[in-house]
Amino acid sequence: QKSSPAQTEFYQAAEEVLDSIRPLLDKDTHYREQGIIERLVEPERQIMFRVVWHDDQGRIQVNKGYRVQFNSALGPYKGGLRFHHSVNAGIIKFLGFEQIFKNALTGLSIGGGKGGSDFNPKGRSDMEVMRFCQAFMTELHRHIGATIDVPAGDIGVGAREIGYMYGQYKRLTGSYEGVLTGKGLNWGGSLARKEATGYGAVYFAENMLQDRNDSLKNKICLVSGAGNVAIYTIEKLYDLGALPVTCSDSQGTIYHEQGIDLNLLKVLKEVRRSSLEAYLDTHPTAKYIPVSDYPTDGHAVWRFKAHAAFPSATQNELTVTDAKVLLEQGVSCICEGANMPSTADAVDLFLGAGICYGPGKAANAGGVATSQLEMAQNASMTQWTFEEVDNRLKAIMCGIFQRSSETAKEFDQPSNLVLGANIAGFRKVADAMIAQGLV
Ligand code: NDP
């Protein structure tokens, strides 16, 4: 039952899950008898708080802070923090709900949560970002802990923000513990965590293609976004012999037929934090499409000919019209680095076409899985090598693909990884909830 019109994205995510697990609910009636659906869609706890801080002009700024502790049946709440002006309670709730199933699919012991703020770090000085992060953590610290709830990064929250928040947590609690993941390498971070979501999405795509005796080698790929996930998706695509030709940010899209200049992209986004338009200063022959020139029914990034697409920016960035164009142009693989980037009707088209379609909650789970590896290293006070973490990540992505694929086959829809991922994740969480009684 939809009781709040302001939670559009949450309803979209919940409907997708509930629709696709129907065959399981019809077969195993005890899930309904145990009220699992009603319990699952209600977060265990939602925290909303005021964040007050001073900007560089000495003015008082007020933002909203959120943490949704959605489900702890499998372990401590785990999920990122998003700082973006579009953040509201419905967005955090959708992300937290998705996180429950994603975390279950990894096979690791982690519950689902998510948080963030409508604060926009873009255009803010380092000192402003620090003051905001300290104010945010001043409230959040009382709700989290290394075995309670372990936040990480997401849109607008990278190493800088995690550092400022970690420093404040330590100051408030006096405790040096793995309460956040995505930390710096010399103060508790894990090698390969930065790369994990993007690399993981590419490993997932390779698993899907190999299952059909195909691979990413020599495939032209469209990537959206220009942040953490997009950059390391592009890096791994090059490693596997593919050619990524696009990237995008909130201002526009770059198309570079020879292949995206990865080093330049890293400098622009990781060091200079500038707009993608600056890409043209080095590569004047590349094409830049500003948002004002996007098609009214979709996104410019999906309108180029390619074999595979990796949506890696944000939710609902790939519309049904984009999906039609991609299919007409012969795309054979869609692999979602972002959370819920394709609209529900676009997903229906992909599933109907029978192409390889890796839904976000399976394909982008490499980030949270590697965060759990960071927690394991912190708890045992060790640091693994890049290769060790990367090998574990590869094995985890392969496991997620197999669990999703085998479950899809069990329900006679072998290429439907949406159904496979949702049922596999749901079953694990629901069984744990039933075993733990009415909590
Ligand atoms: P970043 O903040 O590093 O990058 C986000 C990118 O997407 C930026 O290029 C940004 O543009 C662009 N973008 C963000 N919002 C919009 C919007 N509303 N319209 C157009 N462009 C937009 O975030 P991440 O790379 O970490 O996250 C990207 C996606 O991946 C999100 O859906 C996130 O939830 C998901 N994800 C991330 C994980 C992680 O480990 N980081 C793990 C699993 C999923 P600009 O540069 O102009 O701001």
Image (cartoon, rainbow, N blue to C red):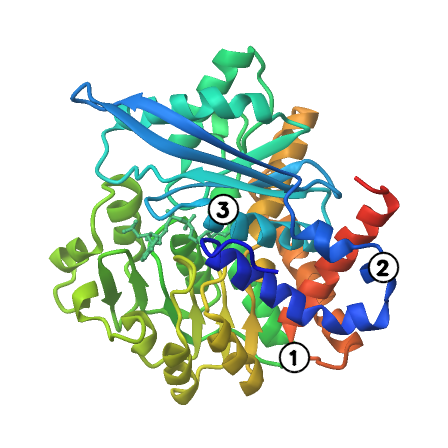
**What numbered label is drawn on residue 166?**
none
> Which residue is under mark 3?
92
| Label located before the other in sequence (3 or 2) | 2
**Outermost residue to the bottom:** 328
Does residue 58 appear in the picture of this structure? Answer: yes
In the displayed structure, 413 sits above or below 105; it is below
Classify 10 Å Cα crowding around label 2: few (below 14), some (14-19), many (20 and above): few
The residue where tag 2 is placed is 33
Q: Is residue 258 left or right of residue 177?
A: left
- Does the CB distance between marks 3 and 2 fall below 8 Å? no
Q: Is residue 49 above or below residue 420?
A: above
The type of residue carrying mark 2 is: Glu
Callout 1–callout 3 Cβ contact below 8 Å: no
SS at circle 2: helix
Residue with the mark numbered 1? 415
Q: From the Cβ of disc 1, is ligand 1 less than 8 Å away?
A: no
Label 1 vs 2, first from the N-terminus: 2
Q: Earlier in the sequence, mark 1 or mark 3?
A: 3
Q: 4 or 42, which is in the foreground?
A: 4
Of tags 1 and 2, which is closer to the observer? 2
Amino acid type of the residue tagged 1 in the rendering: Ser
Q: Residues within 10 Å of mark 3 (few under 14, many from 20)?
A: many
Q: Nearer the viewer, mark 1 or mark 3?
A: 3
